[in-house]
Image (spheres, helix red, strand yellow):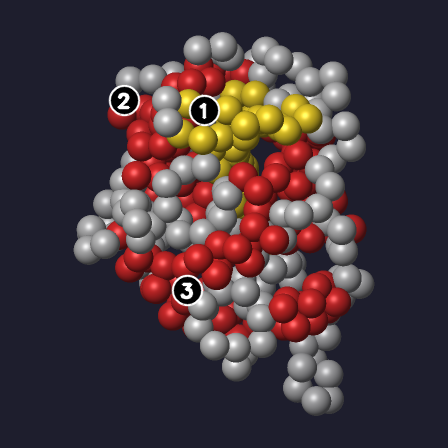
Amino acid sequence: MASDGKPVWKDPDIGMVRQLLAMARPADAPPQTWAERRMGMDAFGLRPLAEGTVRIGIDIDGLHSERLTPPGADETRALLYLHGGGYCVGSPLSHGVMVSRFAAVMGVPALVPNYRLGPEHPFPAAVDDALKAYRHLLEGVAPEGIAIAGDSAGGGLTLALALAIRDAGLPQPGCLFVISPWADLRQVGASYAALEPVDAMLSKAGLDEFAAAYLAGHDPADPLASPALGDYRGLAPLLIHVGGAEVLLSDACAVAERAGLAGVDVRLEIWPEMIHVWHAFADQMATSWRAINEAGAWMKSKLG
């Protein structure tokens, strides 16, 4: 802690990223509509994809999706990526750059479904669309050759999808990877009080707003809405990345405990000082690249 009471960060880049975030959305900025929030998040994705990546749009029985294919991709394997955005914003465009980097490390094509969002399409629309995308991949790829990954709400959706896959009697994928998962829509974890003062992106009040818009009165304790409360028996190997300076730390820990108690091969990594989904800031932080490379290598190693 500096003499002025502000944190002193050991990571050489995290302070700069925090400044960029503060400038992008000042504390006194007026409230935004859902349309404005979506436009702002999509603008973040207006950057070049990983070198050589080919991007095409596909239609899965009415579900628009994007396929990102790096050079020399192994077509017998695939990454199904579920974007974050609180179940109300985000798209394949907003997350395409980050996903293309994971796909490049893994050497596989990635499918990014543009799943339906709240408040227009509340729970369980996102889960239904994610399951549709997985069924689509199973038509051409063996389940053990599929990795499912997601960040924030997409991380929670990844876990909910794994539960839905099992309950539908479908085979589990080769592995699951979640970044900063929003996995308990009740916002009850101890990390809210402990870490909200240093969280550069999220707050309990903000997540309460998104949860209300997505749930539309549905019980947040439903495991397909809050998979931190689910039964993890029979789920695929799971890797969890979470930042040490974000309010969703408690969600990640709760998921790891549930998975461990159910006998799942689970690995929880808490990255000190890191913010929510720091992987998205690889243009500014070396630590982001390290997280992408390590997670990509882990997923690749788990695919049959």
Distance CA(mark 2)–CA(mark 3): 36 Å
Tell me where residue 7 appears, x and y as whole percent. 67, 77
Q: On the image, numbered disc 3 is attached to which residue? A: 33
Indicate left or right for 172 with 198 as reference: left
Image disc number at residue 59: 1
Along the polypeptide, which appears first: circle 2 or circle 3? 3
Q: Residues within 10 Å of mark 3 (few under 14, many from 20)?
A: few
Q: Secondary structure at mark 1?
A: strand
Q: Residue at x 45, y 31 (%)?
A: 64
Query: Splitting the image into 4 quarters, where does residue 4 fall?
Result: bottom right
Could you tell whether 39 is left or right of 15 in the image? left
26 to 56, vertically: above or below:
below
Distance between the Cα atoms at labels 3 and 1?
Answer: 28 Å
Report whether 102 appears left or right of 32. right
Looking at the image, can residue 251 be seen? no
Residue 144's spot in the image, x, y percent?
50, 16
Q: What amino acid does circle 3 point to? A: Thr
Q: Is residue 83 visible?
A: yes
Identify which residue is drawn at 66% across, 14% down: 74
Mark 2 is surrounded, within 10 Å at the Cα level, by few (under 14), some (14 to 19) or many (20 or more) other residues, namely few
* Tag nearer the camera, 1 or 2: 1
Residue at image location 20% in from the left, 51% down from the top: 218
* Quarter placement of the C terminus: top right
Quadrant in which the N terminus appears: bottom right
Instruction: In the rendered view, tell whether residue 165 sits above or below residue 30.
Output: above
Amino acid type shown at disc 2:
Ala
Q: Secondary structure at mark 2?
A: loop
Location of residue 132 (image quadrant)? top left
Question: Which amino acid, mark 1?
Answer: Asp
Question: Where is mark 2, residue-wise?
Answer: 168
